[in-house]
Image (tube, helix red, strand yellow):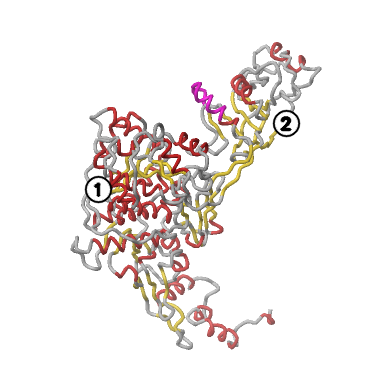
Amino acid sequence: MPLDPKALGQALDEDLTLHTTLCRRDAPAFQRAARSRDELVVACTQESRLFTELSQQTEGAVDLDVRPIRFVNIRETGGWGREARQATPKMAALLAAARLPDPEPVPTVTYQSDGRLLIIGPLEQAETLAALVSDALDVTVLATGGSGQQARQYPVVAGQLQSLRGWLGAFEVTVSSSNPIDLDLCTRCNACVAACPEGAIGLDYQIDLSRCQSHRACVKACDAVGAINFQRDAQTREEKFDLVLDLRDAPGFTQHALPQGYVHLPPTADAMAQVRAVTQLRDLVGEFEKPKFFTYKQKLCAHGRNLSVGCNACVDVCSASAISSDIKRNQIVVNPNLCVGCGTCTTVCPTGALSYAYPRASEQGVKLRTLLASYAKAGGKDAAVLLHSQAAGAAMVNDLGRMAQLDKTVRGVPARVIPLPLWHTSSVGIDLWLTAFAYGASQVWVLMTGEEAPQYHDALREQMAVAESIVQALGYSGRHFKLIEVRDARDLPLLDSELGEAPAQGVTRAASFAVQAEKRATLDLALDHLLQDSASRAGRTKDAAIALPAASPFGTLNVNRDACTLCLSCVSACPAGALQDNADRPQLRFIEKNCVQCGLCATTCPENAISLQPRLLLGEERRQPRVLNEAQPYQCVRCGKPFGTLKGIEVMIAKLSGHAMFQGEALERLKMCGDCRVVDIYTNPDEKKITDI
């Protein structure tokens, strides 16, 4: 591939030497670098294992725990494309990002597995697979029919599976059984099978009660053992297992992302799938750790207030069923054992109450700024950032690069497209998309490969529609945000075509702000920069507003002043401080910048007087409190002090005037302030006292 070491060195501020066979004839050059304590970046991922072993075998080489080797692919990502000779700025960007330090460590989630495996399925298949793992795992079989082996090698449980829940090391299984044959007593002598005139007893030693004609020949045949009892009450047993292998057609879990430790192997699975399943299960014994992918701040959460549900986006989108509502505590609950780290919950969260931690948004921001700044410094223009998963997505990008090397009709990854691998493509959302655009990317694309849950595609499209509406309204032409959906190698021509899209209009001046820990703070910084950058691009008044799709985290409220009584229930329900009262007069005030469009105010309002309107207000008014409704105060009929709103008191009096407890003087007291009410009760000679009863 064409390499320009001088231009790359200038972009990276270091002297570079070009090697053509660093993993072969030029290996001594790598060994010299391995002895240095300076940062070591190898622009090859294909031979990462070889370079790692070579470093370990080199005398005097710095220990990899002290100074790790960082590997980056500049070949398939651009060096093998049709535009390889123009890819120097992209190579510089990828090399600069590779030099960044590793993200800060995050808390971990621990699993403990002792190898207790439950296999659910037909006996013959279950016992065949059990034989492949029984030397490493403690196997129990839950039979769903079939014919078992004569030898009793594994505990066999029969019955109906009532519930299956849990995760690696902590599966809880509930089985109910009403079958007359007790498998713990059964000796598998087959006497009952031979004696049954209807053939209702199979070699799983269970009776098909729909075929049984109550001859009870089986009971007589089993008299000595006593394993058959038609009078036996239904039994329910609960057991715990570390692992589950499910051989049924439909999996025992309905969510897209299955729990760790649960393997579904349907009858249609081929031999390779069986090998993978067996290998995976054998390795799941011991103590395991995974990152805790998220952080949760309840004070920012807009899920619920006062037993009313507002934002439910994270609960609805989670493909692992790891998020549930705890409305009694006005919060959500995330089960870290079930969380698989997709991060989609953080992408759809409007407040930033859920944030992604692997890596943190601030660390992703540093990488984006490094990539785009290095690209621009090396002379690159119209950068397009391609976000993809570090597994399937990276494989698709590499396959496209190899195809471009072999087939000259294939473009490959264009020189302006900068691939950026992520743990999961859904973990980056509108805050970082707009930040990347503000940093100088003309486009941000997300590559999805079919491994993601279907609802993730919808969620990202909705968020992209919001981002696109904003930049379009600010005067930036072209399509800036796009979801690229492919499946496998069959879609490489589609991927090649999608990556060839023309550049969109970007910012004239790249932003310099840092991504903040709070999502809303980052969004505000990105929007402020785009507003300033686009000021000369579009003729707008300072009060102009951008209409946004329903998924928008920005917007205003419409209040029906005729219906609103200024009870201010919405103020106490608002989790973002967007709605406020006024201590001096009856007013409902609103700060649009704070509104997250959660809908709690509309849900709480007893008069249904509030509706949401997604939009982005561009002027300074979005930061200032404005009055949505105000009313004339109601003055106490006794002392004249204002204590409520005229409409509120009138509505209350109208509703209670027909009640037996509020007649005569009691109704009149509703027109008094709290102090006068007490005074009136104690000074009224006609008021009945407790001592008179």
Q: Earlier in the sequence, mark 2 or mark 1?
A: 2
Residue 270 sits inside the magenta stretch: yes
Q: Secondary structure at mark 2?
A: loop
Disc number for residue 578: none
* Residue 156 drawn at (x, y percent): 68, 25
Residue beneath the point at 69% across and 35% down = 237
- The three-letter amino acid code for the residue at tag 1 is Arg
Whether residue 558 can be seen here: yes
Whether residue 466 can be seen here: no
* Residue 517 drawn at (x, y percent): 44, 59
Q: Report the side of 35 relative to 108 (left or right).
A: left
Front residue of 119/16: it is 16
Q: Quadrant of residue 520?
A: bottom left
Q: Is residue 374 above or below residue 623?
A: above
Residue 498 sits inside the magenta stretch: no
Front residue of 80/661: it is 80
Q: Which residue is mark 2?
A: 233
Which range is magenta? 266-279
- The three-letter amino acid code for the residue at tag 2 is Asp
Front residue of 364/34: it is 34
Q: CA distance from mark 2 to mark 1?
A: 67 Å
Q: Secondary structure at mark 1?
A: loop
Badge 1 crowding class, 10 Å Cα cut-off, few under 14, some 14 to 19, many 20 or more, is: some
Closer to the eye: label 2 or 1: 1
| Magenta stretch secondary structure, dominant | helix
Q: Report the side of 259 relative to 599 (left or right).
A: right
Q: Which residue is mark 1?
A: 479
* Residue 299 drawn at (x, y percent): 50, 62
